Amino acid sequence: MKNVVSAGETVGLLLLSAGEATIAAWHPRKVEEVRRRELTLTDAAEHELLGPSYSHPRGSGEKAVANRSSAQRDLWERRLERHRARFARSVAAETAREAKRRAWQLVLVLGDPRRAGPACEELRRRGVPAIRSDLVLDWLRPAALASRLAPEVERARAELAGPPGRAHRERR
């Protein structure tokens, strides 16, 4: 695998949001959508935990209900976020296969760091150079997305071509 991505090469994109992921190919003037996946919520993730848990039957309905309800809500949110991270890793594995099939030398991963971080890790684990960006731009049309991402692609190419060991560091 080359260390430097030339300016004419197509760059893979993985755009992650809370509810979906898009695998795409970036070209200087357009973005070609390859595949879009929606997050499916499992029964555990869909079922929001409300109120006190059954394991704490003590206390009247008035005492500390907000505190216990809050703890249940936090537990549900943590479960949902873990589910989203697993989804990001799964889509990253799919992106790695696509990157190898299309000979992408780089995949730029965009989105919330809670999902983009695990996706980058999975891509790198599968031997695909990945650079993370905190941008969330999946709502833009393909032509606008292509031009908005041009500076990010150049930054990612420069980072990949930088000194040894730097290519796999995430943007902070």
Image: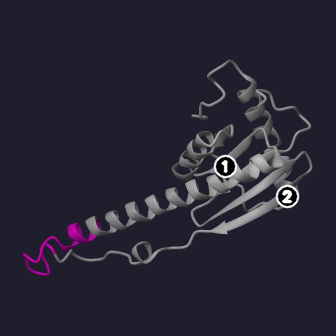
Circles 2, 1 touching at the beta carbon (< 8 Å):
no
Q: In which quadrant of the rendered view does residue 79 lie?
A: bottom left
In the image, residue 163 above or below residue 33: above
Numbered disc in front, either 2 or 1: 2
Q: Main secondary structure of the magenta part?
A: loop
Tell me the crowding category of disc 2: few under 14, some 14 to 19, or many 20 or more residues within 10 angstroms, Cα based. Answer: some
Q: Amino acid at mark 2?
A: Glu
Of residues 111 and 121, the one drawn nearer to the viewer in this rendering = 121
Q: Which residue is mark 1?
A: 110
Q: CA distance from mark 2 to mark 1?
A: 15 Å
Q: Quadrant of the C terminus?
A: top right
Q: Nearer the viewer, residue 127 or 85?
A: 127
Residue 102 sits above or below residue 87 on the image? above
Which residues fall within the magenta stretch? 55-70
- Which of the 4 quarters of the picture holds residue 89? bottom right
Residue 30 in the magenta stretch? The answer is: no
Q: Indicate the position of residue 100 as horizontal and vertical percent values.
A: 76, 46
Dot 2 or dot 1: first in sequence order is 2
| Residue at x-position 58% and y-position 46% | 122
Tell me where residue 88 appears, x and y as whole percent: 57, 56
What colour scheme governs how the chains and residues are painted in the rendered image of this protein?
Answer: one colour
Residue at point 58%, 58% (across, down): 90
Residue that mark 2 sits on: 32
Q: Secondary structure at mark 1?
A: strand
